[in-house]
Each structure stands twice: as C-alpha cells, then as structure tokens.
Image (spheres, rainbow, N blue to C red):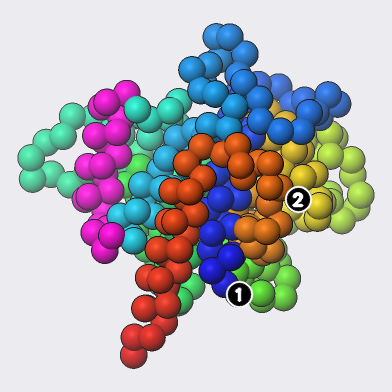
Amino acid sequence: MLDKFKGCLLGAAVGDALGMPNESTSPNLNKMKYGYRRPYKGHPNERLNPGQYTDDTQMMVLVGTLLADGKYNEERYAAALRELYARGALRFPDGSVSAVLEHPVIDNIPQKGVKSTTSGCLPVAVPFALTFPDMNEGCERAVRACNVTHTHPAAHAAVSTLVTLLYHSLHDTPKPVEKALEKAQVEDEVLGGKIRNALVLEEDGMDTETALLKIGNDVSVFQTLPIAFFLISRYPHPPDLLTVAANTGGNTDTIALLCGAYLGAARGMNALPADLLDGLEDRQRIELLGSRLYSLYTRKLEQP
C-alpha cells in the first residue's frame, strides 16, 4: 500500500510535468515524443524546465503537506494558496483560481470560490483519497476543499468522482473505473453521462484522435475528466498512457496528472518509468509526502 501512496502522488506529478509544455496547445497525437520537453518560447510556462510541474501539483502538494502536518483546514489552505499566488509563485493557475485569489480579503468574511466548472480543483482531491480510510469522508472533505475555489456542483461531483476512482484503485477494488462512473452518475447527471459516453467510445474501439475531438480537452470538468477516463481505459501500458495523455493538448497537464495519479494508485510507484521519476522536480519531497500520508492513513485506520 505504501508503494501505491507514493505512486499516486508521483504519478500525478509526472503526468503534470509531461503535459506542462503542451498546456493550451493543439493535440499532437501524430508526432508524439516520449519524455519531458521544454515549452515553446512565449508559452505561459516558458520559464519552466523539462520535468517541472505546474500549479496543479503545487496545489496537490500544498494540501497534502497541510494534511500530513495535521494543520489542514479550509482557512489555512486558502491563506497558503493566496500567499503562493501573491508571491507570483503559482504557475499559470486556472482562471477560476486566479479570480478567487485576486479578490481582496475582507476581515471576518469567509472566502468563497466562484461558481465555475473548470478543473483547477481536481488535483486537490488526490491527497484526500489517500488520507481517509472512509471513502465517503474523503469525498466530503475533498468537496469542502474544492469549495475554496470552486462552488459549482459539477466541480464538486468531479472531485468526488476522482476520489472514488483513486480510492478503489488503491484498495484493489474490482473495476474501479466503473465504481467512479457510478459515483459521477449519482452526483451529476451531465458529468456522469459524458464519462459514460467516453467509455462507450473506448469500448467501441474508436481511435483516440477521433475520440478526442468528440470528448474534448478543454479546462472544464465536463471534458477533462471524461477524456482521462477514456485514456485510462484505452492504454494499460504506463509509458503509452502517460505519453498520449501528455499530448492531448488543451488541459493536457491536468489530463495527464489524472492519468498518472490513477496509474500510481492502481499499480504503485514501480509502474512509473524510472527515467521519468529521475527527471521529476522535487521527486524526493513528493515521495516523502506519500510516506507521510500513508502514516496518517494508518493512524486513522487504527482509531476506533
């Protein structure tokens, strides 16, 4: 289980770093290259080097560290995220996240997210899937964290769906993708329908390039999550899954992060290509965080 905890966080970061240079670009499935790349000149991430990750992993690590330190609550998360943004250290953040963080803080008034369906809140769900032995509690706590930046019910449904996918993958539940689909259908009819349609396209054997056109790759949870489900179901070989996900274009950093998190949760750290782990920014720090969250999980498991 420890290997899976480390793998989930590392896989997410690897996927993010692979997708980083292709964020907001067109799909590149015909000329894919394996491994980390540098963004083109003028790209919003142009100051990042190969193997560095985006705001997605920054937010995931921020929440995971607060949880591991025993200091997490929504107020601390919001304050830490705002401080990161104010320093200009948050890397090409989701527009909805930026809108929240640019809003002035007013004393004694709770901070509220925006009613948005963008996927900027999805990476935050990853550490909650790892921390709580009770999946329902993990979903509930992840939704509360999501609410700091995103208040739309579809964003909450997407977060719960991701926690469900990762939880069942970690615990070797049969057919975790189907379990997550069931959760999505209960939480949001539209999101559940889009994920189901994506899985039908995969089952019918539609080629990935055509499926990508039909499903979409934009920043909304209605496209980011369904295309990730399609890719997870289509590509069982880790290098293939990570490489294709990183070349989908659009919201490719988040799409690849989701695929990497699933891969690590389902198959452990050893399933991740060694050269990608070696070239990943903050690899040791993220691996240590996985160990710390596993310790927190086992302590919670032992509590009556």
Residue at x 35%, y 27% (from the top left corner): 89
Question: The N terminus is located in which quarter?
Answer: bottom right
Q: Name the one closer to the observer, 298 or 191.
A: 298
Residue 181 at what x, y percent from top left? 66, 62
Q: Which mark is residue 279?
A: none
- Residue beneath disc 2: 238
Q: From which residue to which does the magenta span run?
A: 69-88
SS for dot 2: helix
Q: Is residue 72 magenta?
A: yes
SS for dot 1: loop
Residue 301 lies, with reference to residue 188, above or below; the image says below
Residue at x 63%, y 33% (from the top left corner): 19
Gap in Å between the C-alphas at discs 1 and 2? 19 Å
- Residue beneath disc 1: 171
Q: Name the one closer to the observer, 248 or 1.
A: 1
Residue 64 at what x, y percent from top left? 39, 55
Residue 37 at what x, y percent from top left? 66, 25
Q: Residues within 10 Å of mark 2 (few under 14, many from 20)?
A: some
Classify residue 60 as left or right of residue 234: left
Residue 108 at what x, y percent from top left? 8, 45
Q: Main secondary structure of the magenta part?
A: helix
